[in-house]
Image (tube, grey):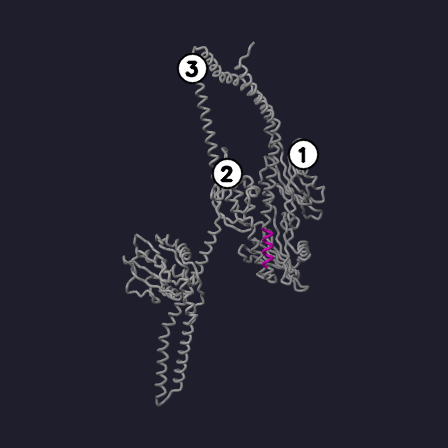
Amino acid sequence: MKISLGMWLAIGLAGLQFLAVTVVVFSSYLTSERAMLDHARNLLSDAGTNTIEHSRGFLNPASGAAELATRLAENKIVASDNPKLLEKLLFQQLRSAPQFGGVFYGDEEGNFVYVKRSDGAGPFRSKIVTRDGENRSTELIWRNDKFAVMDSRPDREDTYDPRARPWYQRASEDLGIIWTDPYIFFTSQTPGITIASPVIGNDNTLQGVIGVDIEISEISSFLARLKIGENGTALILNRNGDVIAHPSPELIKAENPDGTHRFANIGEIADPIARAAFENLSDMSFVSIDEETSAEFEFGGERYVSTVMPIISEKLPWTIAVYAPENDFIGAIKKNRTQNIWTAAIIALLTGIVGLWLANYIHKPVRAFAVRSALISQGELDPSAPIPRSYKELDRANEALMHEIAERKKTEHEYGQTFDMSSRGMAQIEAGTARYAKVNSKFCDIMGYTEDELTKMTILDLSYPGEPTIFPTLNSEDSDDFAFNLEKRCIRKDGEVIWLKINAIMIRDEAGKPLHAVATVDDITNQKAAETQIHKLNKDLSHIARGNMLGEMAAGLAHELNQPLTAITQNVDAALTTATEQPKIDPELIDILKDLDQQAHRAGDIIKALRAFARKDEASKAEFDFQELLDQSLRLIQSEANEHGVNISVVSNDLPSVTGVRVQTAQVLVNLLRNAIEAMDCSGIDEKLITVTTKAIDGFVEVCVEDTGPGVDPNLNLFTQFETTKSDGMGLGLSISRSIVEANGGALWYHRNKVEHSCFCFTLPTTELAENRIEDVVKT
């Protein structure tokens, strides 16, 4: 029997389809279980990592608190020999950290101050032990949240000596911060740890030891909330094999023969599964895991997976151990295994049958093409006759597919060119690790690294210590769009600290899973430096304005007071002359008049000294760029102009450098601009415009500030002290401004322009003119 090409195609297609389905099903059967177990181990590892980070975050504040309190005591901010002040310091430290159980300080004389949380007469209880030679006293004080005393009493039975405690002795020997092994607190019967730090005096001798008691029962609460499969459990082991944290905190306590409590060892804890998984760790002299270790074990006829994490640190020699039943992860696979095999076989058979029909359908146009070719070759069919419909559909589908592929390649090429040739720094950042997957040349220039070096680094490697990082956000599985905009400091390869402005978006796949973030980066170091300079200018302006205003006010008052004092002295002299010419001289009246004359002259001397002090000018003149000062002053006043709806226009040409006191000149310019804004704001006009014009004229730079306000009352003497049109003004601004300009070698005047608007102008000498003046003085 001859088998046609179509039959061979149908059989081959059906056979390949059946074989492919069968291979996929059986390979899935063999690998799915192992893949799920690997996934389970990853989940256990993630749970261990989360527990490590939580423990560090929970305990790190204690170390910082101990160091801070030590520095305070060493620098005599709170004297350690003043128990009351020291108690208040420790009380504040305890309130600032909810995980602290108590804070204490003991010194070399045996004095001791301890503040702890309490369930007694107040929420806090202090214990103060003071010693004077062989005499000692112990006082217990209960306080509320505001440090008010709720109750107090002496404790005559107390014999506590901090110098005999292990934490004091270890801190004294090590002369550094020490962490005790976890233990069960005697009073509260809760698990905890003590951190202690020595206090060193100015003579490098030990003054005492300060420490913190931390309750770590919250870590057990965290483990209880931690979700690890359906029945997984995480626990924390100390280096000696003691279980110091467990989702069931009642299991970690064991009773000593004397009735006290201690931590249960992993070999005796009432968690049989944990014993089966990790009991071998208690055989060692101490638990020391150098790397993450995964294992499988069986208990009660059920298979389990477990993971033991490396120790957290030398200070926290704790090991995180996690276990969970295999069925939590592969139970469903085992139940559906047989069913899936039969289902796959049935599907393969059905798809094979469909494949036979599909192969025949696909071969049908080929067969029609062969018949058409034969008929054309025999002359029975015109070659120009329409081709079968199936060919046109296939041709259109192929054309659409080719067009889509070409467009995709074009888009990828354009994106690649945009990324590589962008004038801004650009980077692709992996979502899972925050590693730079791809960077362009501009980003390499900004950071000073090569592309190969950057693709081996992460965001944290370039961040300045303490700066915010986007790494936690990059790991988020949130389906919402991710976009952020921030400014942060980074460190270049050469060690220079630079400011970067970063804009980033998250790219996700069709399922919403984060693929990578695309970030654009700009170096704004110079912009930040300019902002800092403007801030300094604003600060200097405020300082000098206050000083000048006080000086002008003092000078004005001195001038006004000098005239009545002169009249007083003259009248006193006349009274003395009249009194001495009388036939009968009253000695007491003469003494009073002389004393009055003496005090009047003394007041005059004081006024002269005040005027001399007010006129003193210690500011030094220097060459500076007026255009730069104008730009900074406009940025300083811009926010105030925007608030009042005022537009500022600048007409400026190339200006030579000028000589004067830079900050005083800025004060004059800002004062004129602010006066113009306030004048237009009070007038109620619609068009509010300030025009600043600068030009160089005969060795001077002339600056004019015009506004569209109503102008100044002609009857007002603008530059006289205490003359003002403002209800809350003092009348010193323009007087001070004219004094500043004249002191810098220029002039300040006012006139109305062609449209009767106010125009204030002032001049400053150019550097060349100032130098010529100095040379003329020297020659003279």
Q: State the residue at coordinates (41%, 84%).
A: 591
Q: Where is residue 705 in the image (x, y as percent from the top left)?
A: 34, 58
Q: Where is residue 38 in the image (x, y as percent from the top left)?
A: 61, 34
| Structural crowding at the residue carrying mark 1, measured as other residues with C-alpha within 10 Å and reported as few (<14), some (14–19) or many (≥20) | some
Residue furthest to the top in view is: 1
Label 3: state its secondary structure.
loop
User: What residue did someone put label 3 on?
Assistant: 383
Q: Which of 194 and 717 is in front in this view?
A: 717
User: What residue did someone put label 1 on?
Assistant: 297
The residue stretch that appears in magenta: 61-72
Residue type at mark 3 is: Pro
Q: Nearer the viewer, mark 1 or mark 3?
A: 3
Is residue 331 shown above or below 458?
A: above
Cα separation, mark 1 vs mark 2, equals 36 Å
Left or right of 375 in this view: 729: left
Task: Tell me the number on the disc at residue 529.
Answer: none
Q: Position of residue 623 (x, y in %)?
A: 44, 61
Task: Tell me the number on the disc at residue 478.
Answer: 2
Sequence-wise, the earlier of marks 3 and 2 is 3
Q: Quadrant of residue 148?
A: bottom right
Q: Which of marks 1 and 2 is in front?
A: 2
Q: Can residue 182 be seen in this view?
A: no
Circles 1, 3 touching at the beta carbon (< 8 Å): no
Residue type at mark 1 is: Phe
